[in-house]
Image (cartoon, rainbow, N blue to C red):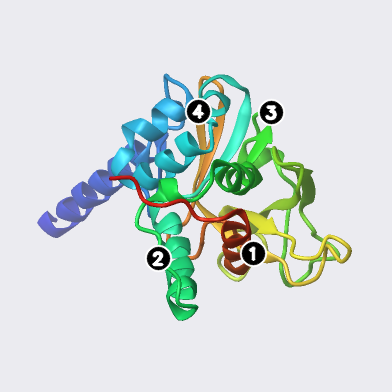
Amino acid sequence: MKIQNKNKSLLLLLTTALLLLGSCKKYYFDTGVHDPKYSGSTLAYMKDKKPFFDSTLTVINLAGMNDVLDKENVTFFAPPSGSVFKSIKRLNQYLKNNGKDTVSQLSQIKPEVWKNTLSQYIFKGANLLKDYPQRDTLAYIAYPGQNYTSYAGRIMNVGAVFNDAGGVKYAGYRQLYLAFIPDLSNPQVALQNNPVATSDIQTNNGVIHVLTKIKHNLGFNTDTFIDQVVASGILPPTP
């Protein structure tokens, strides 16, 4: 009888814990726990999470796009600072291999390069995960997601991947993907898929979907980013 009572108590505790977790409207991925709604602008949210977005905020400022993320109604697929670091690392490897001085400050890269790069992550209007169509990288013709025009005017693909659960296809959790299309004349070929780590952060002026810091380099195609930096010219470091 005591064992039965103990089992009942344990079951009650587990049930209570599940109910509490279910009622707590927060998301957790590799960027931490987040409330789905934030009382402030998209830019203000990122400043609140500055250690995670430190370099990204510098890029936003250098690109002259503070007002876009502070005042305009936009959806931002936010690259974390780790993505910026990886692209700069690749850039410096290229420069070093070609006998050129490396970049020690983000301000050495010209504002127009930062603006063009960053604008690929921004879309007018506020869209949540539920607003995007299904995407299946193994059945792309049936579930292609949808192409959207970014703030820079480049066509990007966005879609929600429906994962499997318990052996049931598409019954699991949904994860948002932002895809870079290398060849716009062949938009279904060799897409670079970038998973979202945390989705649906709703700010006063839009929505933030945070890209994973592990699988993404700022600029999507790092070789193209390097070409743009070199073609524009690299500024000397400031004292």
Given residues 130 and 15, the one toward you in this image is 130
Q: Type of residue at label 1? A: Thr
- Are the residues tagged 2 and 4 within 8 Å (C-beta)? no
Q: CA distance from mark 3 to mark 2?
A: 38 Å
Q: Which residue is mark 1?
A: 224
Q: Which residue is mark 2?
A: 102
Q: Type of residue at label 2? A: Thr
Identity of the residue drawn at 38% across and 55% down = 30
Q: Position of residue 129 (x, y in %)?
A: 62, 42
Q: Which residue is mark 3?
A: 125
238 relative to 188 in the view: left or right: left
Q: CA distance from mark 4 to mark 3?
A: 17 Å
- Are the residues tagged 3 and 2 within 8 Å (C-beta)? no
Q: CA distance from mark 1 to mark 4?
A: 24 Å
Q: Disc 1 or 4, which lies upstream in sequence?
A: 4
Q: CA distance from mark 2 to mark 4?
A: 27 Å
From this viewpoint, is residue 175 visible?
yes
Q: CA distance from mark 3 to mark 1?
A: 27 Å
Q: Which mark is residue 66?
A: 4
Q: Disc 3 or 2, which lies upstream in sequence?
A: 2
Q: Disc 3 or 1, which lies upstream in sequence?
A: 3
On-image quarter of the C terminus: top left
Q: Residues within 10 Å of mark 2 (few under 14, many from 20)?
A: some
On-image quarter of the N terminus: bottom left
Given residues 144 and 91, the one toward you in this image is 91
Q: Position of residue 208 (x, y in %)?
A: 52, 37
Q: Residues within 10 Å of mark 3 (few under 14, many from 20)?
A: few
Identity of the residue drawn at 40% across and 37% down = 26
**Residue 188, placed above or below residue 35:** below
Outermost residue toward the right in this view: 185
From this viewpoint, is residue 32 visible?
no
